[in-house]
Amino acid sequence: MNSSREPGPQASKERAAQAGLPDTWELLGRYWDAANYLTVAQIYLQENALLRRPLVAEDIKPRLLGHWGTSPGLSLIYAHLNRLINKTGAQALFVAGPGHGGPAIVANVYLEGTYTEIYPEITPDAEGLRRLVRQFSTPGGIPSHVGPPTPGSIHEGGELGYSLMHATGAALDNPELVVACVVGDGEAETGPLEGSWKAPAFLNPARDGAVLPILHLNGWKISGPTVLGRQSDDQVTALLRAHGWDPVIVAGSDPSLVHPQLAQALEGSLARIRKIQDLARTRGSTGPARWPAIVLRTPKGWTGPAVVDGIQVEGTFRAHQVPLSGVRGNPAHLAQLEAWLRSYRPETLFDDAGRLAPELAALAPHGQLRMGANPWADGGPDVAPLSLRPLQTYALDVGVPGSVKHETTKPLGEMLRDIYTDTADDPRFRLFCPDETNSNRLGAVFEATDRCLMEDGAEWDDHVSPDGRVMEVLSEHLCQGWLEGYLLTGRHGFFASYEAFAMVSASMTVQHVKWLQHARELPWRKPVPSLNILLTSTCWRNDHNGFSHQGPGLIDTVLSLSGSVVRVYLPPDSNTLLAAAAHVLASRDYVNLVVVDKQSHPQYLNLDDARAHAAAGASVWRWAGNAGQDEPDIVMACAGDVPTEETLAAAWLLQRHVPQLRVRVVNIMDLLVLPPRDVHPHGLPDTDFEALFTADRDVVVAWHGYARAFHQLLHGRPNPGRFHVRGYNEQGTTTTPFDMVVANRMSRYHLALEALDRMHRAVDGADVLRAHCQEMLATHHVYVRKHLEDLPAIRDWTWTPPLPGPDGPDGSPSNNEGEDGHE
């Protein structure tokens, strides 16, 4: 950050007290005019930014993009928040829900001076203004949304619905921050925003900051009315009161009346916030607070063209985007645009050099009190890393690989518990989970903290209190959105979800990846802690819930995004999960997808081997094959816990019954080592890829997700057709664990049959094993429908070094179902 952004709150507060603000609203109105003028200029102009001569067609951009309708309301709120900050010294963050109001926020950040500090070429003069307007929505310029290039922003708003949850996440564990969140009435119709009104049930005034929602009802979407815009004040306020807010109405179309109303509402809201917080911080929290909220009703496209071509525009949906179109070829529209721009009297707003008039510049806060310069909008004042205890604290003693079973995610829960303990005096970590913390075997966290809920307690509550820092709410949108706001302001966390239902917020994941991808290109943006998504209760072990709970689609979604941002890890056991968790919690500017089941699974690697495997991303498990250092006849590859178990069982069958066949087992933990290095930075060099999978041998793959996703990763590798992938193929129901892998043709028997089909030489025992596999599949089909559980040979199977020969421990391969393992 530039040092000029550094003056502290006290200095700015003293300056504000000395300067004061007049009782009239003339200066504030002119400041609003300046913001509106610059907004219109950004949408329309490429030259003549200050109208120092009559407007001509060549001054107009060839493509007119941007959204005017919401912009005057955003600038009105921004100007009044400046006034409030100057009077009180409040630390405020501005979240613009109507994301297409980008030109308004850029205009205000420019007027306050922050924009020039970050982009020195956008100078506070006539040439800087020219560059400012030319860059908006033009090639090589800035987007129309309040995106990463906009100082002060943690929320783009391109996809509506997430503003209030991002604001809430920013306020958690941030006691001095006030997050002013403008919610558009179109956005208020979305499901995520509708759920976001529940924030008062989770914001603890004793330790959190405050969220001030400003519901801006201008009545219209892009081509029709909004629901809340058409409802009465009583209906709207009843909705907000039901969720715990204490709303006040500000309404009108006459600026001279709206200015004092809004000023009074904002001052009263901040006073109410401070009273709530002071009471909670001296006497403790005694239940959910009645946080203030503002409902602002003003015309859409306010101060813009009232009528165009005889049709009403201001106050209608026609003001939503570009009210005057075809300006270059329509002289009447060009004249009307010039009249519109001159109505703001730019000659009174900017001096001869193009600088903002001194009396207007004095209205903006100074230093870090400017909303565009608030350090919480740029990763926080200090992005401190989490201090993790040694992983040995939680590691499992594995012994012989595969001989021990354990609920894979339980050690991670112990690790997260200790993070809570170790950050108790400096809270900067939270777990977000939709009512599934215990279900996902992460319940150890409740030894250190509770579930957060401000509502009154009940006799049978289990670890529920206002002081809790585990955020459980039955909405994937809220869990992920709160966490995103928490991360973008410099704190750390995990979002744990049932795998299938992480798709509920998949679009949020896409938006966050896009934000990080562009933020990385901005040297002034600090790296922020990564978004870590733990997918458990996976498709292969949601057999008790059924088909609706079975779906690995988020992997596909993430893999289609920027390789510079996304990572996908599939730890095969607890120790590799611990290694992955330590890595992702220390990472910055990534979206990390960690996919592992919560149920009891075989454990394979001690901690040192787990760390080495996690660092490599994929390894040959020589103990699981019989090829040693030799070239194998077949490679059995696996990615994911259940695929790993089935692959090991298939390799066991092959080695025992076809001992002449040289088998290599490869486990893949970091999915993105598979693409070529020029496609993804984690991609293995060709020599390392060949060392794992050979240059020309067939590879039978057991894969956690959809086969198409795995094949997509191999594109660009030599001879990718030699990879034969078995994965989830939309076959599922409420059934037994093994029946799930059978239904999707990924069972050990299917994998062994696939390997036998891909051999390039004849080997003894192949036909016998093939018949055995087919017989076992038939036996399984009958057994599970009769006994309602898996065969003992399947249920109780554990890895042991295979003993090759015609007869196993229990006889020939075809005469005893128990021969496939130890009962």
Image: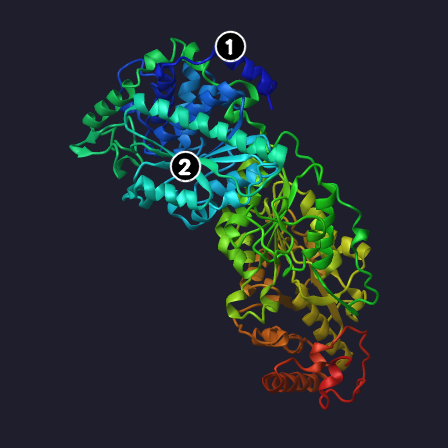
Q: Is residue 294 above or below residue 457?
A: above
Of labels 1 and 2, the one closer to you: 2
Which residue position is annotated with label 1?
A: 18
- Foreground residue, 583 or 216? 216
Answer with left or right where residue 501 lies relative to residue 791: left
- Foreground residue, 254 or 398? 254
In this view of the protein, can residue 710 be seen by the observer?
Answer: yes
- Foreground residue, 572 or 133? 572
Residue extending farthest right: 399
Residue extending farthest left: 310
Which residue position is annotated with label 2?
A: 247
Q: Are marks 1 and 2 in contact (CB under 8 Å)?
A: no
Residue extending farthest top: 352
Answer with left or right where residue 172 lies relative to residue 609: left
Q: Which amino acid type is marked by label 2?
A: Pro
Residue at 46% of width from left, 49% of height from top?
195
Q: Residues within 10 Å of mark 1 (few under 14, many from 20)?
A: few
Quadrant assignment, res 309: top left
Disc 1 versus disc 2: distance between alpha carbons?
Answer: 32 Å
Q: Residues within 10 Å of mark 2 (few under 14, many from 20)?
A: many
Answer with left or right where residue 729 lies relative to residue 260: right
Q: Which amino acid type is marked by label 1?
A: Gln
Q: Is residue 87 above or below residue 496?
A: above
Q: Where does residue 323 sit, x and y in percent of width and height?
A: 27, 32
- Badge 1 marks a residue whose secondary structure is helix
- Foreground residue, 494 or 231? 231
Going from N to C along the chain, the mark reached first, 1 or 2, is 1
Residue at 30% of width from left, 39% of height from top?
219
Q: Is residue 520 above or below residue 702?
A: above
